[in-house]
């Protein structure tokens, strides 16, 4: 697993209403974008920019539920890419040090990770698929 950082969020309206999050490996130059939904992009942006909300949002609720069940989010992994769709995993650790892996969308996993300050990882296989040797991503916002 390759440690990554969330480096950009692009929220677009209009003709190309797609939202993008960019992940970059910590000790390298590979970077790629994942197209996500508007709700998740807003949730990530609000947390990154520390925008207060009057009421807890869905990802805040999930964070609270995990904590109330005696667990914590240990890491988030963008684990695979199939047919143009990214898949992710939440690695949860219980008080008894048992680890559970939960399948989820990358957008939800990233939204939860920014709330819990949880490390993000991408599998080497995903990097090989999205950043082939010698290829560079050039997305101009």
Image (cartoon, rainbow, N blue to C red):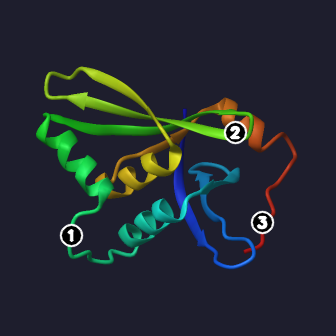
Q: Earlier in the sequence, mark 2 or mark 1?
A: 1
Per the model, the C-alpha gap separating discs 2 and 1 is 37 Å
Q: Residues within 10 Å of mark 1 (few under 14, many from 20)?
A: few
Label 3: element kind: loop
Q: Relative to residue 16, is residue 125 depicted above or below?
A: above
Q: Earlier in the sequence, mark 1 or mark 3?
A: 1
Residue 127, numbered label:
2
5 relative position to 31: left or right: left
Residue 29: give x, y in percent of width and height.
70, 53
Q: Relative to residue 27, is residue 11 depicted above or below?
A: below
Residue 139, numbered label:
3
Q: Earlier in the sequence, mark 2 or mark 3?
A: 2
Label 2: element kind: helix
Q: Quadrant of the N terminus?
A: top right
Residue 84: give x, y in percent of width and height.
73, 40
Q: Nearer the viewer, residue 26 or 102?
A: 102
Extreme residue in the front direction: 15
Residue 125: give x, y in percent of width and height.
68, 30
93 relative position to 84: left or right: left
Q: Relative to residue 22, is residue 50 depicted above or below?
A: below
Q: Is there CB contact under 8 Å for labels 1 and 3? A: no
Q: Nearer the viewer, residue 8 or 68?
A: 68
Label 1: element kind: loop
Residue where numbered disc 1 is placed? 55
Extreme residue in the right direction: 134
Residue depicted at 44% across the width and 49% down the height: 108
Quarter of the image holding residue 16? bottom right
Residue depicted at 36% across the width and 51% down the height: 112
Q: Comparing marks 1 and 3, which lies closer to the viewer?
A: 1
Q: Comparing marks 2 and 1, which lies closer to the viewer?
A: 1
């Amino acid at each position: 697993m390759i440690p990554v950082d969330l480096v950009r969020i692009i929220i677009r309206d209009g003709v190309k209403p797609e939202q993008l999050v960019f992940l970059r490996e910590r000790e390298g130059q590979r970077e790629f974008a994942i197209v996500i939904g508007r709700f998740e992009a807003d949730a990530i942006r609000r947390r990154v920019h520390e925008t207060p909300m009057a009421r807890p949002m869905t990802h805040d609720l999930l964070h609270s539920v995990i904590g109330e069940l005696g667990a914590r989010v240990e890491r988030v992994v963008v684990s695979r890419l199939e047919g143009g769709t990214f898949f992710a995993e939440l690695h949860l650790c219980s008080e008894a040090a048992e680890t559970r892996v939960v399948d989820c969308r990358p957008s939800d996993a990233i939204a939860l990770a920014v709330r819990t300050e949880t490390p993000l990882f991408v599998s080497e296989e995903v990097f090989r698929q999205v950043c082939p040797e010698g290829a560079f991503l050039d997305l101009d916002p």
